[in-house]
Image (cartoon, helix red, strand yellow):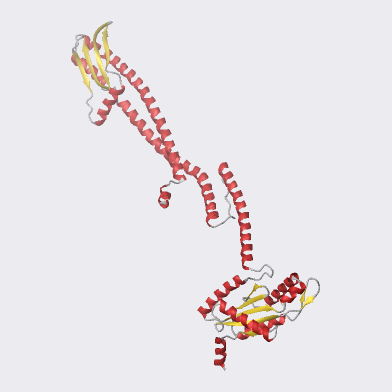
Amino acid sequence: MKAANKRMRPTLRSVLGRGHLNVALLAVGLVGVSLTVLGVLALQVYANHNLHLIARSITYTVEAAVVFDDRVAANEALALIASTEEVADAKVFNNDGEQLAHWQRNDSGMLAHLETLVATTLLDEPVNLPIHHQQQKVGHIELIGQGRSLLLFLLGGLGGILLCMVLSAVIALYLSRRLLGDIVRPLRGLASVAHAARRERRFDRRVPEAPIAELNELGNDFNALLDELEVWHSHLQSENQTLAHQASHDSLTGLPNRAFFEGRLSRCLRNAARQQDHLAVLFLDSDHFKQINDSLGHAVGDEVLISVADRIRAQLREHDLVARLGGDEFAVLLTPLHSREDAELIAEKIVASMKLPVQLDSGSSIATSLSVGIAYYPVDGTDPASLLDAADAAMYQAKRKRRGQWQVAQTERSAAEIKNRS
């Protein structure tokens, strides 16, 4: 339904184009009709006056024939004048009312019928003038005019109106296209920028200048609005990024949190299952951290955790991930893993990095260590929970043996694999 409504709605170009064309045709039509009517009225007066002059000329010409009652001379004289003038019918009568002469134009066809119709409509009734001889009436004539001049004028007027309307339509279309270019182009540019801002969030685009003052002012206001939207969008993106980082990272150390780590571990496990790769999870716990918190305070504990996080991160490869799970517990994801020796080497480096005392802001130093448990995929677990549990158990086993060491998980599958190797 929406698509159908969209197709039915006319464009601004078509609306303005039709409007200009209709106005131009109406104006030309009204002017043409007005001029034609005025011309017909003027020609009507002229034709009636001319018809009376023709009648007067005929009375002078047939005067002698009427006096002598000469029908032949009267017909010749009548035909001589009537045939050369716009006369449709002419009759000459004597005083007794007898017809002495009669002349009638013998034109036929549609044009003659139209001429008669125009003459009947626009010209006077048959002109009736007396014939005088020596100041005495000797007869009279009856004359009916021909409407050829009026018909030709009407046809010419209609042709002129049609020609002017065609020329006006062409000129109106040309001028409307020029005007439409000045109107439609800025509006299309504004619509394009608005669509880009709404659909693609492209707040960096701007509406170009327009030649029409009102449209240019509209574009400037829209650009100012886009400036504000761009600032607001940048601020919102920054806040969203900050909130997303805060939701997935530890505020103290800046490391990813447990949720982030488990999500990454789940994806890496799926990839490893598809590609039959190996990976390792390290579970790390700071030794004697509770004693540090209780004896020296949480501020010193926080300094120790930050230093521990930095030292762990410094021992990892580019694609490895370290996260703070909570309290003094950390986890490391090693992927891709080519051999167990790589994981054990990294665990050894992490343990060794803690041999140097942690320098505090107060200038003093404090010694601490890390116990590390290592679990391998797929031997020690195939899902995040089982791998973390295996690494956690290995870490506690390392603590029980001697703190500040690393220990590989000893699950049933790993024990069976070691037995098979031996």
| Residue furthest to the top | 135
Horizontal side of 146 relative to 202 (left or right) equals left
In the image, is 20 to the left or to the right of 96? right
For residue 203, above or below residue 184:
below
Q: Nearer the viewer, residue 234 or 333?
A: 333
Q: Position of residue 346 (x, y in %)?
A: 66, 82
Which residue reaches farthest bottom?
A: 422
Please say if 418 is above or below 186: below
* Residue 305 vertical placement versus 407 (above, below): above
Question: Which residue is located at x 30 percent, y 21 percent?
Answer: 123
- In the rendered structure, the answer to whether residue 240 lies left or right of residue 151 reads right
In-front residue for pair 213/92? 213
Depth check: 342 or 220 in front?
342
Q: Position of residue 355 (x, y in %)?
A: 74, 81
Query: In this orientation, does residue 200 appear?
Result: yes
Residue 57 spot, x, y in % from top left? 29, 15
The C terminus lies in which quarter of the figure? Answer: bottom right
Residue 33 falls in which quadrant of the image?
Answer: top left
Quarter holding residue 109: top left
Q: Is residue 146 visible?
A: no
Give the total of numbered labels: 0
Residue 343 is situated, as x and y percent measured from the top left of the image, at 63, 83
Residue drawn at the location 26% of the way across and 25% of the way down: 116
Examine the rendered structure and indicate whether residue 227 appears above or below residue 339.
above
Compared across the picture, whether 215 is left or right of 121 comes to: right
Q: Residue at x 52, y 50 (%)?
A: 191
Task: Please report the residue visible at 62 percent of the width from the left and 68 percent of the height from the top.
Answer: 248
Residue occupying the far right of the picture: 363
